[in-house]
Image (cartoon, rainbow, N blue to C red):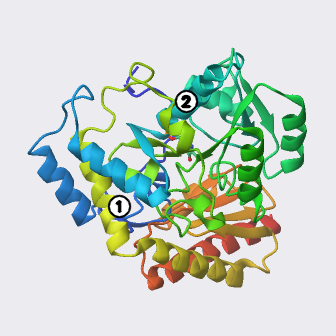
């Protein structure tokens, strides 16, 4: 027993010592382009000066007091987020899974208050919502659930991007209280639904009195070219969950609610020791101010199209590449074969990327990339894939 870390990850053999913008340096001084941003977390790149300054100053002033007292920075952050989302209230926690737990509890309580004693939440195939018991149950991936049965009750699953099944459930199941979906499935393989899906879902939820709950943990905070991905369709959900990019690496999650959903929780229903501390909120406020000041949502939209077009130009006609798809700076390249080994091959070339759903190369680069860096990334990825696919053809 020489390894003191629990074996929850198969880690790559590299450790990073420092970062700046889109770049990381390992312990030997080797430089890497970070096209995954710590999985959609460091949207402002590494060591962003505004976030570093906010965290350092707040750490030297006041780190934590608990939610037993008013926290003015939390009030400010909540006001900013509900303004940006067009919603009403926020609950702060420390991760995406916790934000979704809050959403699930909120939906169940809402159901019970309305006389539904077996409240059911509709979730999608291919979804990812986290690794706690309720959120891994909501997740649509058998590998995440295997070995952790019995799962939590009260979820039913429908195909993603499919309204007909939902309409059938609407006609048949009186226990449904909410639908929980990602605007783009990230872990599920950068699956972008048909235009109109979220708008139609909003209408169905209105019709049925269901809460529309949108998991924007990966898509939110500017990544898709709007503050929140559901805004591309002019949709305001009843509940929205956030985490990843919100603190640019400082752990913070949020569950936003609007309308009736904003009044569901009352004192005693839900709580957190660490959530929404002055330190976490100072980091998130610096993130929001930087995105607004530097117009990074617009940059994400611009860079996303540039990267997508660059990849389509370079890979569109390549045998073995099925599709290149994306939404803003969430980009997936779907191959016709499993390609997990690309992560290690890319690392050797000084490029950090991710493979999800077995054969989808996923890129989630920082929103602070330059145009030249976006072109560099397209070149690097195209060259990596050309080599991988032609070697495999020859073999
Ligand atoms: C990463 C992710 C989560 C889980 O967030 P954690 O902070 O790891 O708990 C939930 N939903 C989506 C869509 C995610 O991408």
Q: Quadrant of the N terminus?
A: top left
- Say which residue appears at 72% left-offset and 58% top-offset: 199
Q: Secondary structure at mark 2?
A: helix
Residue contact at pointers 2 and 1, CB within 8 angstroms: no
- Vertical comparison of 217 with 192: above or below: above
Is residue 17 found left or right of 9 in the rendered image? left
- Vertical comparison of 264 with 244: above or below: above
Q: Position of residue 366 (x, y in %)?
A: 44, 66
Residue 395 in sight from this viewpoint: yes
Image quarter of residue 136: top right
Residue 21 in sight from this viewpoint: no
Q: Which residue matches tag 2? A: 106
Q: Quadrant of the C terminus?
A: bottom right
Q: Which residue matches tag 1? A: 288
- Say which residue appears at 32% left-offset and 47% top-offset: 250
Is residue 395 found left or right of 209 in the rendered image? right
Q: Earlier in the sequence, mark 2 or mark 1?
A: 2
């Amino acid at each position: 027993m020489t390894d003191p870390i629990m074996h929850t990850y198969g880690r790559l053999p590299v450790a990073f010592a420092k970062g700046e913008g889109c770049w990381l340096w390992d312990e030997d001084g080797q430089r890497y382009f970070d096209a995954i941003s710590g999985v959609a977390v460091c949207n402002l790149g590494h060591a962003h000066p505004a976030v570093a300054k906010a965290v350092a100053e707040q750490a030297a002033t006041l780190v934590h007091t608990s939610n037993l007292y008013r926290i003015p920075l939390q009030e400010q952050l909540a006001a900013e987020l509900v303004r940006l989302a067009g919603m009403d209230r926020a609950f702060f926690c420390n991760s995406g899974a916790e934000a979704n737990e809050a959403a699930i509890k909120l939906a169940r309580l809402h159901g019970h208050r309305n006389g539904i004693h077996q409240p059911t939440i509709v979730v999608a195939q291919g979804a990812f919502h986290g690794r706690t018991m309720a959120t891994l149950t909501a997740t649509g991936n058998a590998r995440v659930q295997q070995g952790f049965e019995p799962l939590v009750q009260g979820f039913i699953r429908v195909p993603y991007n499919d309204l007909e099944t939902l309409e059938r459930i609407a006609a048949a199941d009186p226990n449904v209280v909410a639908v929980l979906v990602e605007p783009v499935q990230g872990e599920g393989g950068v699956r972008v639904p048909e235009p109109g899906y979220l708008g139609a879902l909003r209408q169905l939820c209105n019709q049925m009195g269901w809460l529309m709950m949108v998991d924007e943990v990966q898509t939110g905070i500017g990544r898709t070219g709007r503050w929140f991905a559901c805004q591309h369709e002019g949709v305001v959900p009843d509940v929205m969950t956030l985490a990843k990019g919100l603190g640019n690496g400082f752990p913070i999650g949020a569950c936003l609610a609007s309308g009736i959903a904003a009044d569901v929780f009352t004192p005693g229903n839900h709580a957190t020791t660490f959530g929404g501390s002055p330190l976490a909120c100072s980091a998130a406020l610096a993130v929001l101010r930087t995105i607004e000041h530097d117009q990074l949502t617009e940059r994400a939209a611009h860079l996303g199209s540039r990267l997508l077009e660059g990849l389509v130009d370079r890979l569109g006609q390549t045998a073995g590449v099925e599709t290149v798809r994306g939404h803003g700076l969430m980009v997936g390249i779907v191959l016709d074969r499993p390609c997990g080994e690309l992560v290690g091959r890319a690392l050797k070339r000084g490029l950090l990327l991710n493979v999800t759903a077995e054969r989808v190369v996923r890129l989630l680069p920082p929103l602070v990339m330059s145009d030249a860096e976006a072109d560099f990334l397209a070149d690097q990825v195209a060259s990596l894939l050309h080599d991988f696919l032609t070697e495999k053809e020859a073999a």
